[in-house]
Image (cartoon, helix red, strand yellow):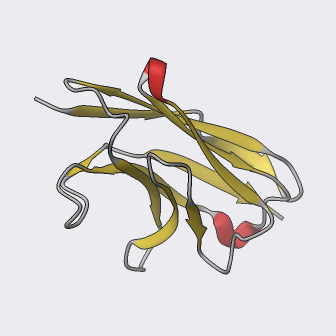
Amino acid sequence: QVQLTESGGGLVQAGDSLRLSCAASGRAFSNYRMGWFRQAPGKEREFVAHRWSAGSTAYADSVKGRFTISRDNAKNMVYLQMNSLKPEDTAIYYCAIDTTAGGYDYWGQGTQVTVSS
């Protein structure tokens, strides 16, 4: 069974940085796309960033230039470095994996990020 576990969330001030981590277990993930999503209170879950196994990345416009997704395939880890955080970045952040190239099929339980102004 595939399991994803996020960590690294917390309460920070605007302008601060955080690094989220996602540990994957149950399968070797080096060949799969991995992504980060977030859900703010009262809003739908939205895409933040993803990284293909070959290294290509994509970001939501709202985080481009501030967030960086990276992965360590040897450790089955994916990271989200978040810089210059804004109050509107406040959300629960989820990592996910796409094992079929047809969409994300496994999700973590999320980690809360709160940015105060």
**Residue 54 picture location, percent across and down:** 49, 48
Q: Please state the total of marks drawn on the protein image.
A: 0
Q: Quadrant location of the C terminus?
A: bottom right
Image quarter for residue 87?
bottom right
Q: Residue at x 69, y 70 (%)?
A: 63
Q: Nearer the viewer, residue 71 or 56?
A: 56
Q: Quadrant location of the N terminus?
A: top left
Q: Residue at x 44, y 46 (%)?
A: 53
Residue farthest toward the front in the current orientation of the protein: 54
Q: Nearer the viewer, residue 52 or 94?
A: 52
Residue 67 to residue 42: above or below: above
Residue farthest toward the right in the current orientation of the protein: 15
Q: Residue at x 19, y 23 (%)?
A: 26
**Residue 11 picture location, percent across and down:** 69, 44
Q: Residue at x 79, y 62 (%)?
A: 66
Decide if residue 47 is on the left or right side of residue 86: left
Q: Is residue 40 visible?
A: no
**Residue 91 picture location, percent across and down:** 53, 61
Residue farthest toward the left in the current orientation of the protein: 1
Q: Is residue 62 visible?
A: yes
Residue 74 to residue 29: above or below: above
Image quarter for residue 2?
top left
**Residue 62 picture location, percent across and down:** 68, 78
